[in-house]
Amino acid sequence: MKIKWIPFILVCGIAVLIIGMRLGATSEHEFIQGRQPGQRGRISTIAVVNADIGVLVDGARSNYSAAIIDTLGEGFVLVSPAMAQTGLANDLYSAIVTFPSDVSMRILSFNAHQPERINLDFQINPNLNEREFLETYVSITGLQLAINTTLANTYVSSIIQQFHEAQDQVGMVFQNDLSHLSALDLIVLEPV
């Protein structure tokens, strides 16, 4: 009796495998084809383009834009400029946020006498409905606020660190004063 069930189980297994492959191929085909006109789904992903060339810090190239981009949440995806434009045209992305080539240089200008403003470029998909447009705008505004907050915290932290380093040097200044006072005590003034 057990031998009669083996061909049946084998046929059922093969049927499930074929049906699964067929459904998977259909889903992949639909994914590759993208959205059909008139059947537009919800667009929520924001494309991020990193055009920042970075800066040299102590002989090593640092790209602060890449560090910022690494902290972005799920709604953002790093792509090339061409992929971003194509995706925006095909309604795959709700917006494009571009980090310009001079972001890292401008971040380092915070310690300069006149810091330079960092401007991110963004383009919102014109095919969004009102709700999607507002959600995208709020996401981009939230991104800008998060970047500003992070940079402000970094700047304040840098000032506090410099202040603490100066406090640590006070002991050396007092030690120098004591050695100079001791040297002055050794000077004997003779009447003229």
Image (spheres, helix red, strand yellow):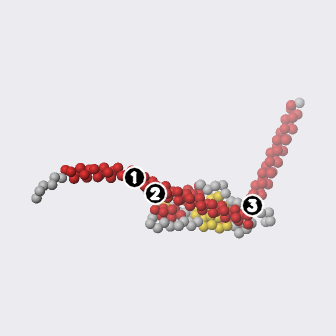
CA gap between label 1 and label 3 equals: 56 Å
Residue hosting label 3: 42
Camera-nearest residue between 37 and 148: 148
Q: What amino acid is at disc 2?
A: Ile
Label count reads 3
Please identify the quadrant where the N terminus is shown. Answer: top right
Residue 46 percent coordinates (x, y)? 66, 61
CA gap between label 2 and label 3 equals: 45 Å
Residue hosting label 1: 167
Please identify the quadrant where the C terminus is shown. Answer: bottom left
Query: Alpha-carbon neighbours of circle 1 within 10 Å: few (<14), some, or many (≥20)?
Result: few
Res. 47 in view:
no
Say above or below: 32 vs 121.
Answer: above
Query: Alpha-carbon neighbours of circle 2 within 10 Å: few (<14), some, or many (≥20)?
Result: few
Res. 139 in view:
yes
The residue drawn where x is 46% and y is 62% is 111
Q: Report whether 60 appears left or right of 82.
A: left
Q: Helix, strand or loop at disc 2?
A: helix
Q: Which label sits on residue 159?
A: 2
Q: Nearer the viewer, mark 1 or mark 3?
A: 1
Camera-nearest residue between 92 and 105: 105
The reply to whether discs 1 and 3 touch (Cβ–Cβ < 8 Å) is no
Q: What amino acid is at disc 3?
A: Arg
Residue 191 percent coordinates (x, y)? 11, 56
Q: Helix, strand or loop at disc 3?
A: loop
Residue 140, quarter of the rendered image: bottom right
